[in-house]
Each structure stands twice: as C-alpha cells, then as structure tokens.
Amino acid sequence: MSRLNNVVIKLWLTIIFIVTTVLILLSATLVTFIQSYFTQETEDSLLKDAKRISQLVATSDNKATAVEHSRKLIEGPVGLIIMNDKHMPNNNQDVTKRKMFKEIKSNKDYNRVFDEGKQISEHVPVSVNGQQRTYVLIGYPSKNLNANNEKGNNYSGVFIYQDLKTLEDTNNLITIIILVIAIISLAITTVFAFFLSSRITKPLRNLRTQALKVSKGDYSQIVPVNSRDEIGELSRAFNTMSSEIQQHIDALSSSKNIRDSLINSMVEGVLGFNDKKEIILSNDMAQNIIQILDDYSLDKLDRQKELTLKDQKTQFEEYEINTRYFVIITSYIEQIQPDGTSGIVAVIRDMTNEHNMDQMKKDFIANVSHELRTPISLLQGYTESIVDGIVTEPDEIHESLSIVLDETKRLNRLVNELLNVARMDAEGLTVDKKVQPIDRLLNKMQLKYQKLALDLELSIDLNPNTDGELWFYDSDRIEQVLTNLIDNATRYTDPGDSITISCGETDTENILYITDTGSGIAPEHLQQVFDRFYKVDASRKRGKQGTGLGLFICRMIIDGHDGSIDVKSELSKGTQFIIKLPKVNTDK
Ligand code: ATP
Ligand code: MG
C-alpha cells in the first residue's frame, strides 16, 4: 500500500491543511487589521495635534511666540508647517519641509484647507536623499492668522507630517511575530495531529488487521472494543460477524463430515453427477468400482446417464466386469448443484454374491433334478425287470434289489440333506452341547466306516488315543460333520489311500484333523467348498454324486459350537479338514 493511502497520513495531512489555511487567513486578517489600526491612530493623533496648535495660535496674542512654542513642542519625529495663506513663499531650509510645502501648494486637495476650511489627511510619497518614503500629511484649517491680510484668504493652514517608516517598522515586527507564532503553532499542530490521527485510527487499523486474518480463514480473531462510538460498534459487529461465520462453518463442516462418513461407510458405491455428467461427489467404493469399468461399461454408463437426464426417471442397468456383477441405479435429482441446476445420483451395488447365489440355485435345481432322475430311473428299471420276470435267477434278483436299496439310500440321503438345509434356514440350527468324552464318537466312526474301507481298499484310522478326554460338543451334530467329511474323503480317494483322524489342542480349543491322501482340491476352489451347493465337478470320483450341501452344513454346525472349520489341500496329495472346538471352561 502506498504511504499516501495510509489513513493516518491522510487524516494527518487533512488536519495540517485545515490548520495551515486557518492560520494563513487569521495572520493575514490580523496583520491587515493591526496595520490599518496603527495608521489610523497616528493620523488621529496628528489631527488632534494640528487642531490644538491651530486653536493655540488663533487664541494667542502673540502669534509668532505661539507658533514658535508649538514648533518646539511638536517638531522632532513630526514636522510642522504653518501657512498664513496658500501663496506663502517656500523659504524653508529643511529638504523634507520644502518638499511638503511644494506638495501642499501643488495638491488641490490641500488648497481646500485654505479655501473651504476642510481637514485633509493624505499619504504622500517623497523621495529624500534618493530613498522613497511615505509620509502622512495632515492639513488643518485655522482662522486667518494674519490680521493684515487684505487679500483675504479665508483660512490659514496648520500642516503636520510624519514619516510612516517607524510605523511600517512596527508593522513589520508585528507581522514577523505573528508569522513566527503561526509557524510554531503549525509545527505543534503537526506533531499533535500525527498522534491524534494515529490514535483515532488505531481501532480502525486493528479492525483491518483482524479482517485480513479473517479473509485468510482465521475466524478466531477478536477485535478489542475500547469505545462506545461508531468504531466501537463496528468492532463489536465485526466480532459478532466472525464468530457467526465460524459457527456456520463449523455447522457446515460437521454436516459435511457426517455426510461424507455416511456416504463412505455405505456398502454401495455412490456417485453424484452434474448436468454436464461430470462427477461432483463420490465415495471410496464408487471410485474403486469406476476404476475397473472397461470401455464398454463406461459407454453404457454414459448412455444410462443421458437417458436419466432426458427422461428424468430412475434407470436400472446391469454390468458384468471380470466375473463381477454390478447394478447401477441412476436417479434424476433436481437442484443438486448450488446454482440450482439438476444432476444425477448413481448408486452402484455389487451383485456378485447374489448373482453367484442365483447361479448356484439354478445349478442346484438342475443337479437335484438330475440326482433324482438317475436313481428313480434305476429303481424303475430294476424293479420292472423283476416284476416283468426278465430277471429270474435268485442271484440276479439279489443283485438288482441291492442296487435298488443303494439308490433308495442315496435318494433318502439327498432328501434328508435338503430337509436339513431347509430346516436350518427356517429355524436356525439347534446345538445341544454336553461335556462328554470324544473317544466314544471317534470309536463309533471307526466302526461305521470299517466295512466300507475294506470294500474300497482304504486304510482308515479314525480313533486316535485321547485318554478319555472330555470335550464340549453335541454328539449327533459332530457325528453328522465327521460322517460328511469321511464320506467325502472316501469318495475322493483311490484304493491304497488312507483316511485318518488325529487330535490336538491349544489352551482354549480342542482340535480334530481329518486327513486323507486322496485327489485333493484345486486352490481356486478351496475358499468356496464351504459355500452352499458348491461342488468341484472335476474332482468327482467313484460315480457317487453329492449335492454340494455337506460342507455347508458342516460349517453351520461348527459355527453353532462357536468353533471353526478350515481346509488345507494339495492336488493329488490329499486334503485336511481342521475343526476347532472351544474347551468347556472357555465357553461361557
Ligand atoms: P453332499 O455332501 O451334499 O453329498 P458333496 O460332498 O459334493 O455333496 P460337500 O460335502 O459340500 O458336497 O463338498 C463340496 C465339494 O468339496 C465336493 O463336491 C468336492 O469336490 C470337494 N471335496 C470335499 N471333500 C473333499 C475331499 N476330502 N477331497 C477332495 N475334494 C473334496
Ligand atoms: Mg459331502
């Protein structure tokens, strides 16, 4: 900011200007008045003297003596000329007096003193010894002093003159004094005006400093309020204003924070577009999804936005990107922007799980139909061959009936698992945990699978030594789990393979390891084998087909025990399922 734009300097200069003007006017008036006053006073006093001399000479018997006395009394700074008439000869020795004589004779105004008896006072410039001087010359009429005068001039004249130089000197001195006083006053005023203007403008300058800080976003500034005048009120209004701005900003930013955290914590992606289809709002989820959209999907989204803006109606579109499925719902929003223009809000929902679930259900229905049709057609074929008498030999009939029995069991198993899942979905799983030895159950499993193992030429060891340890579990449910796991193992093993169960523990958990040396599960399927209806087609063995529900039910049961089930597997090396059950004292 330039110095002259500083408010202190401006005020200061203004005060100096006003004071200077006033002082100049005052001094000029004073000087003029004093000069004219002194001149007037001098003229009046000379006039009085002239009058007195005139009267003295007129009333005196010896006029010559009177004139002589008067001359002695008055002459010095003042000169006296007494003329009987205007024709009196000029025989004065004194140069000044001679010049005055000449002036009286030549100036018509002074003739009027003799002719008309008038008083005349004039300033007469006279050059004495080469110096120009101004004299005041007073003419006063007097009764004819010369009694013998026959020609009879009406009046004689008493003339008094004085050099104005002493008066001018006095005037000059007074002028100098006035000017010195004026200059001193101006100097004092200048100093005081500076302090005054900086004091008056101090609150304003404070206000300016705080206002600059506020403009930079620091709203905590408080201006000190020291007066009750307009500036004080301004400061108070400023303080109120900045605290209100602060409150508004706090309110806005807290509502923005709430909005942001709400939008960011949403599982769905949210995008806001303006009327030019540019993104004005987005959450993390939406940004992640937008990044994986390919060119085709971006084009499709663009068309969807256009349609939404045009129809002003909500649009739904499905997108498939790298085996992931999304639904984008775009809605037209009026006045989404501060300038009142409308835009679009898009909600992006990841439908991959739902889509996979749908797909699984479809597969499941296809599978179930297939599973049902195969045993039913087998049952039909074998029973028909017996009923129609095609098979007659007892051995053949026995073989057919055992196939019928097998298929009936498979049908029964299938229907039971479906019922189980349906019941669990409807009612939730009930688990009736008890503290009981685990070896009882493991022994049972060993007996249950002994015959099958022999048939399949597998070596099984399902009953490790547990020293009668007490575990906390629902015997029927865990039996169901182990049955499914061993059942699976028998299906995905070849003759010569082994299936074993071993135990372990941590401080808080009892652990069961169900290990087989079978075909194993490919890594890409490992995470999904516990999903409902999930089956790894490629690993199907022995022609027995499952429903993909076994491991799903296992996990539900183990979850019901507050435990966990996990799987490790390597293709063509084998599979291990790990079941962890909380110990009794930790299950509170
Ligand atoms: P269900 O048990 O309902 O008759 P399922 O046995 O096919 O049908 P799950 O028990 O859930 O279904 O098993 C899911 C899939 O996991 C199986 O289809 C199979 O591919 C794979 N799997 C399970 N256990 C093993 C194992 N021990 N070895 C290799 N693959 C296995
Ligand atoms: Mg199974």
Image (cartoon, helix red, strand yellow):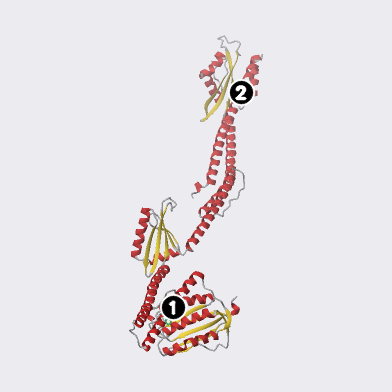
Secondary structure at numbered mark 1? helix
In terms of depth relative to the viewer, which is nearer, 38 or 213?
213
Query: What residue is rendered at 36% in x and 53% in y?
Result: 311
Alpha-carbon span between mark 2 and mark 1: 155 Å
Q: Mark 2, residues whose alpha carbon is within 10 Å: few (<14), some, or many (≥20)?
A: some
Question: Residue 436: horizontal and vertical position, in percent?
Answer: 58, 82
Above or below for 127 versus 559: above
Side of 87 relative to 73 (left or right): left
Question: Residue 469: horizontal and vertical position, in percent?
Answer: 58, 85
Secondary structure at numbered mark 2? helix
Residue behind mark 2: 44
Ligand 1 rendered quadrant: bottom left
* First in residue order: circle 2 vs circle 1: 2
Query: What residue is rendered at 52% in x and 88% in y?
Result: 464
Question: Residue 451: horizontal and vertical position, in percent?
Answer: 45, 89
Above or below for 233 versus 157: below
In terms of depth relative to the viewer, which is nearer, 29 or 63?
29
Query: Which mark is drawn over residue 412?
Result: 1
In terms of depth relative to the viewer, which is nearer, 36 or 412?
412
Nearest-to-viewer mark from 2 and 1:
1
Q: Mark 1, residues whose alpha carbon is within 10 Å: few (<14), some, or many (≥20)?
A: few
Mark 2 C-beta closer than 8 Å to ligand 1: no
Question: Residue 445: horizontal and vertical position, in percent?
Answer: 50, 85
Query: What residue is rendered at 52% in x and 21% in y?
Result: 103
Check disc 2 and give the amino acid type.
Asp
Asked if the residue under mark 1 is in contact with the one under mark 2, i.e. CB atoms within 8 Å, the reply is no
Asked which quadrant contains residue 180, the reply is top right
